[in-house]
Image (cartoon, helix red, strand yellow):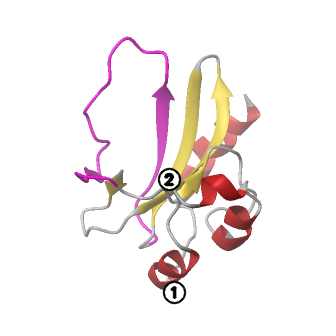
Amino acid sequence: MSTDPSGHRIIFHRIKLIENIDVYEVVALSGSPWGLFFVDMYHSRKSRLTPNGFQRLSGPQQFIGFNHYWDDFPCGFAEQKQAMPKDLRLVYASIDSVAREMIGRNYERPELHEAVLQQILAM
């Protein structure tokens, strides 16, 4: 699990599968930074590198995101979580804890991020 430099957790969703690479859009619950993570689940070794603007947390963390495309990302976490099978909900952060971190935050994608996102979605 990652955070922004201030320690805010990230929220994510999978936007696309390109060949064997999963593409995830992420944003810190603080509203910035935004990013794209490219994950190759079949790569021969696991990387410990962290993208610029993010830092790794040690120890177990609950997920705040989903392995599917989410139309109004990052808003609507409660609805996304409620739509999941009940047995998976326990590994996800509570709706209340996510809502508290999101209060008063602006979730507007930066122009460059939006342009790259649209190119990937068009592929």
Residue 103 is tagged as 1
Measured as percent of width and height from the top left, residue 34 is found at 46, 56
Quadrant hosting residue 14: top right
- Find out whether residue 37 is within the magenta segment: yes
Inspect the image, locate mark 1, and give the three-letter code of the amino acid beneath it: Ile
In the displayed image of the protein, which residue is found farthest to the top?
44
Choose top left, top right, bottom left or bottom right for residue 30. Answer: bottom left
Q: Is residue 65 left or right of residue 48?
A: right
Q: Nearer the viewer, residue 112 or 30?
A: 30
Question: Which residue is depicted at the point 47% across and 78% down?
Answer: 97
* Residue shown at the point (64%, 16%) measured from the top left: 19
Q: Is residue 122 magenta?
A: no
- Classify residue 21 as left or right of residue 59: right
SS at circle 1: loop
Segment colored magenta:
31-60
Instruction: Give the x, y percent position of residue 76.
Output: 69, 71
Name the residue at the front extreme: 87
Residue wearing tag 2: 26
Identify residue type, mark 2: Val
